Image: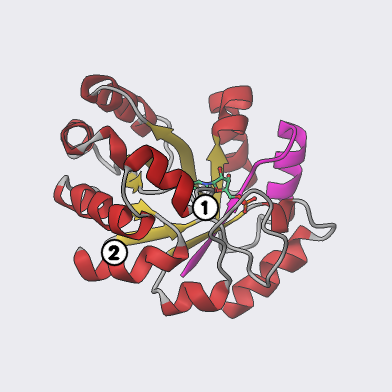
Amino acid sequence: MKLCVALDNDSIVDNLALAEKLKDCDIWLKVGFRSYIRDGKEFLIELKKINPNFKIFLDLKLYDIPNTMADAAYEISQLGVDMFNVHASAGKIAMKEVMDRIKDLPNRPLVLAVTALTSFDNENFKYIYNENIAQKATTFAKDSYEAGLDGVVCSAFESLDIKNNTAKEFITLTPGIRPFGEDAGDQQRVADINVAFEQMVDFIVVGRPIYKSSNPKEVVEKILERL
Ligand code: C5P
C-alpha cells in the first residue's frame, strides 16, 4: 500500500514547503483542482526539482464529451505526471476513447476513474444516481475495467468488492482516510489504515491530517511505519 499526500494548501509556497519537508519520504503527491488551477504546470516542475522521484497524481477528475476528454488526457500525458483520473459517470465510451488516445504513448500515466466521491452519503448519492453507493461504485468500477483503465478512486469500504468484481491488480485509491481516527471534515465515508488493509487498498490519500498538522513529516513517518 502506498501513501499519497494531497497538496491542498492555500498557496504554492506552502505546498512547496510541505514537499520539501517530505522529500526523503517514499510517497506520492496529489495535485488537485485548487493547486493546478492556481499554479499550473510550473508547480509540477517545481515539485520534480525538489525530488525527481516524487510520483505525481494529477487529480483533475475529467468529465466531458469523449473527444474532449481524450484530448485532455493526451495533454495531461505530456505533463510528465504518473497518474490522473476521470469520472466513471462520463461513461464507458468516453473512458475507452481516453485509453485509445494515450495507450501507445511511451510511459503513459496510470488512469483511474472516480466511482463515488467520498463526500457523498448514501442519500445524497441516490438523489443523483438513483442507486446505492456500494452497488453503483461496483458497476462504475466494472465499466472502468472493461474500458481498459488501470483502476478506480473509491472509498476504502468498497475496495475489496471492486477487486472481487474486476481483478486483484485493478488499482483502488481511497481518499477519506483518517489514519488514526482524526477529524473527518466534509468526508462522509472515512476509514482508518486497518480498514484500508482489510480492503486490499493500493493507495491511501491523506490530506488535512498531514498538511494541517504542525509536524507533517512526523505524521507521514507514522503512517509509513504502518504500511
Ligand atoms: O483532506 P482530505 O484527506 O479529506 O483530502 C482528500 C483529498 O482527496 C482531497 O484533495 C479531495 O479533493 C480528494 N478526493 C476525495 N474524494 C474523491 C476523490 C478525491 O476526497 N472521491
Q: Position of residue 103 (x, y in %)?
A: 19, 39
- Helix, strand or loop for disc 1: loop
Left or right of 23 on screen, residue 142? left
In the image, is residue 101 above or below residue 194? above
Relative to 160, 21 lies left or right: right
Q: Where residue 219 sits in the image (x, y, percent)?
A: 73, 66
Left or right of 136? Residue 9 is right
Q: Give the labeled residue for mark 2.
A: 162
Secondary structure beneath disc 2?
helix
Image-based side of 212 in relation to 99, left or right: right
Is label 1 in contact with label 2 (beta carbons under 8 Å)?
no
Q: Nearer the viewer, residue 2 or 48?
A: 2
* Span highlighted in magenta in the image: 1-20
What amino acid does circle 1 point to? Answer: Asn
Q: Residue 65: percent from the left, percent from the top?
A: 26, 22
Task: Kindly identify which numbered label has been placed on residue 125.
Answer: none
**Which quarter of the picture shows residue 128?**
top left
- Say which amino acid is labelled 2: Ile
Residue 205 lies in the magenta-colored region? no
> In the rendered image, which residue does mark 1 sit on?
53
Of the image marks 1 and 2, the number of the one nearer the N terminus: 1
Which of 67/190 is in front?
190
Q: Residue at 37%, 29% (x, y): give it.
A: 78
In the image, what residue occupies the spot 76% across and 34% down? Answer: 13
Residue 170 vertical position relative to residue 101 in the rendered view, above or below: below
Residue 94 seen anywhere in this rendered image of the structure: yes
Q: Which class describes the residues within 10 Å of circle 2: few (<14), some (14-19), or many (20+)?
A: many
Q: Nearer the viewer, residue 209 or 84?
A: 209
Residue 11 part of the magenta-drawn span: yes
Residue drawn at (85%, 57%) of the image: 214
Is 10 rendered above or below residue 166?
above
Where does the image place residue 106, in percent across and percent down from the top left? 25, 40
